[in-house]
Each structure stands twice: as C-alpha cells, then as structure tokens.
Amino acid sequence: MNKPMELLVVAPWGQDIGFRLGGAHVAMAANASALNELLARALAGKETGVVALPEAMREWISEPLRKTLAAATFPLMIFYRFPGEWAGGEEPADEAAEIIQRAIGYRLRIKP
C-alpha cells in the first residue's frame, strides 16, 4: 500500500504556528538559496504532494527550478498570502461585528 503524500508548508519565522497547530509539516526558508534547496529536496523525494508557500517567496524560485516544477506532476505548488498582505475586504471591526451578530443574534457597535 502506498504511503499518502504530505503537505509541506513553507512559512517565514513567526508565521508558522497556525500551520503547525493544523498538523502541517512546516519548513522555514530565510533566503532564496534555502528555499531552492528545500524545493529540490521535495522534488527528489516522493513524499511531498503539495507545497504551500507565501506569494512573496515566488520570486525566490530559480528559473531552472521553476521550469522543473512546472513540468512535474508533484509537488503541486500553492501560493498563499498572510492577512496583512490582503487587499480590500471589510474593516476588521465590521467583520468582527458581523461574526458576533451571526453567533448571538445581536448587532454590536465595535470601535477600534
């Protein structure tokens, strides 16, 4: 029986806690060299099915490795953003008020 492939999350230092609590295998890359080494190992080993890394690190991937990843079936590359990088959306106070209203049925005014 084949072993299931794992999710590898690349996260900057201090942004890894939530991923670890969620049970993901987390690695940290401080620079482009470390990231390219990490991705090359993920390609060579057949245990990693999905690699999730911050959108900001996309430019760190070397061109030869980028081409190899594009041609490979696994690992699947997923890029994510942290909430501080998101554009648009509701103001945090409005969003919190909406969540509270759904939970208890009352609309509260929250002033930041």
Image (cartoon, helix red, strand yellow):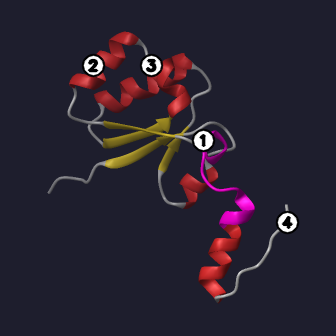
Relative horizontal placement of residue 18, taking residue 39 as reference (left or right)? right
Which residue is disc 4 drawn over?
111
- Secondary structure of residue under mark 2: helix
Q: Spatial distance from mark 3 to mark 4, Cα to Cα?
A: 42 Å
Q: Are marks 2 and 1 in contact (CB under 8 Å)?
A: no
Give the CA separation, mark 4 to mark 2. Answer: 50 Å
Q: Which residue corresponds to mark 2? A: 68
| Residue density around tag 4, few if under 14, some if 14–19, many if 20 or more, within 10 Å | few
**Which mark sits nearer the N-terminus, 3 or 1?**
3
CB under 8 Å between callouts 3 and 1? Answer: no
Amino acid at dot 1:
Ala
Which quarter of the picture shows residue 47? top left
- Give amino acid for label 4: Lys
Q: Which residue is mark 1?
A: 87
Hey, which residue is sitting farthest left in the picture? 1
Front tag of 4 and 2:
4
Residue 85, magenta (yes or no): yes
Distance from the alpha carbon under mark 2 to that under mark 3: 11 Å
Label 4: element kind: loop
